[in-house]
Amino acid sequence: MSAPPPKRTPGKKGTAVAAPPARAYPHSQEAERAVLAGVFLKPDVMHSFADMLKKDDFYVPAHQILYSAFLDLYGKSGPTGIDIVTVSERLHAHALLEQAGGAVFLAELTEAVVVGASAPHYAGIVRKYSEQRKVIDHCNAVAAEAFSKGADVEALKAKLRAAVDGPSALSRRPLQVDISAFSGPRYLGEYPPRYAWLLDKSLPLACLGAIVGPPGAGKGTFAIQLCIAVAAGVAV
């Protein structure tokens, strides 16, 4: 029996084009398992990526549940609170042990051949794939909106740029400052503000100052004498 023809969607001028094949979201189960196994082997590595790597960055649901338990224990007791016993008890208390793969899966992770110090490297891979999936979701949402006859094309372009560039795009924009208000004869004809001096023309009063000099010049001795004079009300 021959295979059915591929589904076709309308193209330009009534032509027909083959629909793109469905593809799995980019992810790496191996990298995710390496992160989890690395934490079991060396819990201190949580310091390296706990703030950067989130539960939803994992693709496999069981890995999300297990890493969420890591984050919870890390937040309460630090890395010393993470081991197979505490993690199992935490999952069991929330009826999540089986959803996280079960006791057998946890035991496999603790016995996995992985270098704990390499966990941050794999965490970066997990994070990268997570960002890719977010871009795909944003682009798919924009594509769905683009099929509407009344779609705002410029708004859709802006959404696409936001999906690709992310929040960091704002920091890459050139800084535009209008300096016209700070130029011209207004400032050329003004005198600098008058200061009240603690030490005449050397150390301002009620203002941040600094005593600068090479080593051994007597900065510390001078500062002590100045403090004593100010405390005693002696003129300096």
Image (spheres, rainbow, N blue to C red):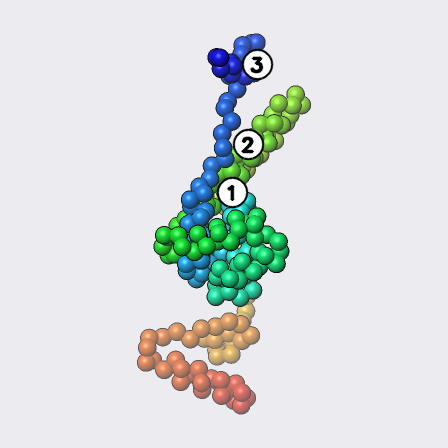
Three-letter amino acid code at disc 3? Pro
Q: Which mark is residue 140?
A: none
Q: CA distance from mark 2 to mark 3?
A: 21 Å
Three-letter amino acid code at disc 1? Tyr
| Residue 74 horizontal side relative to residue 219, left or right | right
| Residue 133 horizontal side relative to residue 125, left or right | right
Quick one: which residue is furthest to the top in this view? 14
From the image, tell me which residue sits under label 1.
59
Q: How many marks?
A: 3
Three-letter amino acid code at disc 2? Cys
From the image, tell me which residue sits under label 3.
10
42 shown above or below 201? above
User: Which quadrant of the figure has residue 10?
Assistant: top right
Q: CA distance from mark 3 to mark 1?
A: 33 Å
**How far across and how far down the image is residue 152, in percent?**
63, 27
Going 62% across and 53% down the picture, which residue do you hit?
Answer: 95
Along the line of sight, which residue is nearer the eye, 108 or 213? 108
Going 53% across and 72% down the picture, which residue do you hit?
Answer: 207
Along the line of sight, which residue is nearer the eye, 26 or 148? 26
Q: CA distance from mark 1 to mark 2?
A: 19 Å
**How far across and how far down the image is residue 68, in percent?**
55, 53
Mark before the other along the chain sequence, 1 or 2: 1
**How far across and how far down the image is residue 69, in percent?**
55, 56
Mark before the other along the chain sequence, 2 or 3: 3
Q: Which mark is residue 139?
A: 2
